[in-house]
Amino acid sequence: MFKLAHISDVHLGPLPKLTFRELASKRITGFVNWHRNRRKHLFTDTLDVLLEDIERQAPDHLAITGDLVNLATGIEIRAAADWLEEVGSPETTSVVPGNHDAYVAGAHDKAMNAWYGYVRGDNNPAAWDEERKIFPYMRVRGPVALIGCSTSIATPPFSASGYFGRRQARETVNMLRAAGEAGLFRIVLIHHPPIRGATSPHKRMFGIRRFAAAISSGGAELVLHGHTHLNTTYWLRGQTRPVPVVGIASASQGPGGKKPPAAYNLFHISGSAGAWHLECERYGLTPDGREMALENRVTLLD
């Protein structure tokens, strides 16, 4: 059996001190939003409680679907790189970026350079190459193929949308087909929910139909996303049967807010190609914020 833990929307805090130059951009809106809203509900100690519980579960791999930082400043990006090293090695941890990781122009590439070991596909160069497209990537771990996609782009103020383009769709199909032919359990990681109506228009993903076509054409067993800070399950059409699309609450969300408190999903994968079994357990923060407790257990594939 292979165990995969999934978290998202880490939003490492607190915010560093920012220069006037750094604030003279879209960051000013995020700065205000952090101090008026996010800092009241996103807590580092909550994240610590969640990670300690995941460590107790001893998963084979950890998937993180974006928004490691808030305003994508250089200090935040470097701090996230240090945090990733504490969480796990690139061998046991896979990351895809979110919209906050590309908050302003140029931030995405700086983050991918700093976090390269965690976003590097098995066949990608050992060293960061800014001229080479990273996404989609494929990493094979045991019976599982992790296909990492990016919807992370810089957007105007008051927008948090993402984009899944034609090139990425074609390469995703090719990777999914190759992984299927190899008899692997295929998991697609993406930040924005690839489901129409799953979030408000200014936060949606452009290319939803393109992504759905890639899944139905290439084949997949599971899609994981973040962005909404909600615990959700949707379904997309697959080659032979529907594919579960699972979202998770923010890993730093404390109790008492408008969004669900911090949670993570633990997936148990067993069986073989054509006869996969997938069970999902969701663990959520207790009302006192001191520990994680099992909230739900469901069989997604059988």
Image: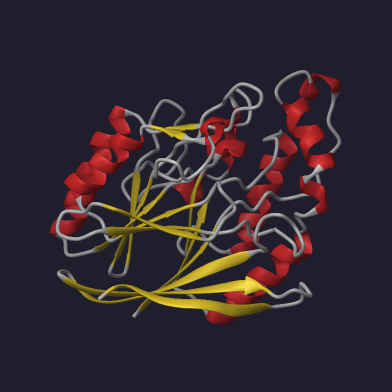
Judge by depth and name the residue closer to the eye, 176 or 261: 261
Q: Residue at x 46, y 28 (%)?
A: 130
Which image quadrant: the N terminus? Answer: bottom left
Q: How many marks?
A: 0
Colour convention of the picture:
secondary structure
Q: Residue at x 65, y 27 (%)?
A: 158
Q: Nearer the viewer, residue 132 or 170?
A: 170
Query: In x, y percent, where is residue 123?
Result: 31, 47
- Asked whether, in this view, residue 210 is left or right of residue 206, the answer is left
Quadrant where the C terminus is found in the figure: bottom left
Name the residue: 71% across, 47% down: 79
The vertical placement of 100 against 289, above or below, is above
Residue at x 16%, y 54% (from the top left corner): 239
Residue 245 locus on image (x, y percent): 38, 56
Q: Position of residue 59 (x, y in %)?
A: 48, 75
With respect to residue 25, does 257 lie above or below? below
Residue 221, image quadrant: bottom left
- The image quarter containing residue 270 is bottom left
Asked if 160 appears above or below 246 in the picture, the reply is: above
| Relative to 278, 226 lies left or right | right
